[in-house]
Amino acid sequence: MIRPWRGTTQLSIAMIIIVGVWLFLLPRISDIPSVRARIDSNRGAGINPTAVFYTDHPGMADIERSVQSRVESPGGWFWKPSLWQ
Amino acid sequence: MSTPPNTTDGNENNDDELRLRSSDYVQPPAWYHVDDFVSMGLGALIIVVAAAASFFTRPADLADLMEAHQAVKSQLMLLEPSAETFSADRKQILKQQADIEGQMTSMPLKSWLVRPGEWKGDPRSAFSKNDKSIVPPLVATFAVMLVLFTMTTVVQKQSAIKFALGFCGVFSLALLSYVLAGQEVVKHYNLEYALWAVLLGLLISNTIGTPKWLSAATRTEFYIKTGLVLLGAEVLFNKLLALGLPGVFVSWVVTPIVLVSTYVFGQYVLKIPSKSLNLVISADMSVCGVSAAVATAAACKAKKEELSLAIGLSLIFTVIMMVVQPFIVRASGMGEVIGGAWIGGTIDSTGAVAAAGELVGSTAKDVAATVKMIQNILIGVVAFAVAVYWVSFVEPSVDGQRPRLIEIWHRFPKFTLGFLGVSLVMSFLQSQGIEGKTLVSGIVDGTTKSVREWLFCLAFVSIGLESNFREYRKMLASGKPVILYLCGQTLNLVLSFLMAWLMFEVVFPNAANELMSK
């Protein structure tokens, strides 16, 4: 038997669940101290955990600059294998 | 990404017809019917506009800024490592360098290409940034994409009105995915927009069914290929030596070994029925998660469901690994440099790598993110190699023999050439001193990155709208995809650790010392 209302009901229920989870449950979870600490730590360090590619990460340019200054450090220690010393 | 073919009318815009079998081989259609060419054209147009916008709005005092930048770089080289103030001086100079580079980079289009931001309890706050509404730029973003993509439907001789109507719906779902992904708990536990975009699409297609008016704009192939051509602008080969030889060994030696081993394991031990599923999971697990999965899936013409399954696996294991790995690094005392390299070489996405590295320490975060960046660059080579392997060895020719060169060329996913071509051009530009570097930064950060993110999100929504839960059940019934991911990741964890230890502890201990220096 075809029940055309079935899909609409399922979609409505799913939407209600989404609204409930995102508007009521998740905001409460974000107040749990360990979760809060993690969020604040990421924010403090300028980290976007959802960055897919390296260019999506807001702090990447600073990281690159800092690492480059070490790789090109005076004395060129970075490139010397232990066997050559 | 496709489902098995059913016709041979040569219209490659229909996703269902993209996986060619020997018996389906036909003369190639006109170029404007092929998504690859249209994607490359559109990608090139966006890059040229972005480059022109960045180039013609350069600051008037560019020459002075370049001189100042050179002076700052010289100061950095003249610093005396044994001096007491070395660390503070270096930080100060790096800050000056960043400021100057910021002033040199012009991004006039950036504020007009946006997406919803982070929020906690009120989703409306996702639509403002620094107390300023981002609704007008969001409308502009929508309008730009609507115009560009509708133009391509006109070129491809399809109904522009139907597409425009459907695009409004697909864009709205993409917008909603970003809002769901922007909730702070979701965001900081790395549940990316890709997951919500696919799920929202699936929710509609598996309940009320995807309405016909919406289907006109579910152009997964086109969004992905254009997004990948734009991603090419971010694949800069100059960054290969960002961490010296140790970085190359951890990222470019271990990764291909893991990729090939996992694929072979999937084929001959697990006997996964779909080679494309095996390849996409192997690539997204070993290279860099979502972006690698997208590039590989497009190169080997995987089914949409295979791509989204691989991404789902990657996201789930990333959430677990970004919590567990920092704990192991700290508990085992393996040190920030080896630990960072290990995290960077194994966790799939850059954001999760940085977050996990930060839990170990600042140096670990820097090393982890840099290793991941070098690994990200591998994506261009992997996509190209997969495309060549696929058309040459996996897809049989008409007579069951190895395909002739012309046949390989006809089947070859041409967008990979666009992807690699853009990557090479941008790498060349990047190598032209600070002027080239800031121009590339202006193009990528100012325009192409935002468009690429939207294109991928639109693609994931389209995948959901065209998929069926039953397909996922079928693929997951044997548990083989999960076993493949687990086995591949275990190998990845072991080899990455061994290589990181070998490089930073045995062969280049100076590199580790230099990275740890304050």
Image (spheres, rainbow, N blue to C red):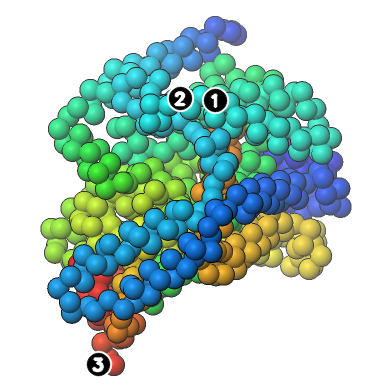
Q: Which residue is mark 2?
A: B133
Q: Are marks 3 and 2 in contact (CB under 8 Å)?
A: no
Residue ID at (72%, 27%): B163
Q: Which residue is mark 3?
A: A85
Distance between the alpha carbons at the discs numbered 2 and 1: 7 Å
Identify the image quadrant of residue A72.
bottom left
Q: Is residue B253 visible?
A: no
Q: Secondary structure at mark 1?
A: helix
**Amino acid type indicated by mark 3:** Gln
Q: Tell me the mark number nearer the camera, choosing from 3 and 2.
A: 2
The correct choice, above or below, for B181 with respect to B32 in the image is: above
Mark 3 on the same chain as mark 2: no
Cα distance in 3D space between marks 1 and 3: 61 Å
Q: Nearer the viewer, residue B262 or B508?
A: B508
| Quadrant in which residue B303 is drawn | top right
Q: Secondary structure at mark 2?
A: strand
Give x and y (percent) for residue B442: 54, 52
Residue B136, labelled with which disc? 1
Q: Quadrant of residue B222?
A: top right
Residue at image location 84% in from the left, 35% down from the top: B157
Asked if the residues shown at circle 2 and circle 1 are in contact, with their CB atoms under 8 angstroms apart, the answer is yes
Q: Could you tell whether B421 is left or right of A55 in the image?
A: right
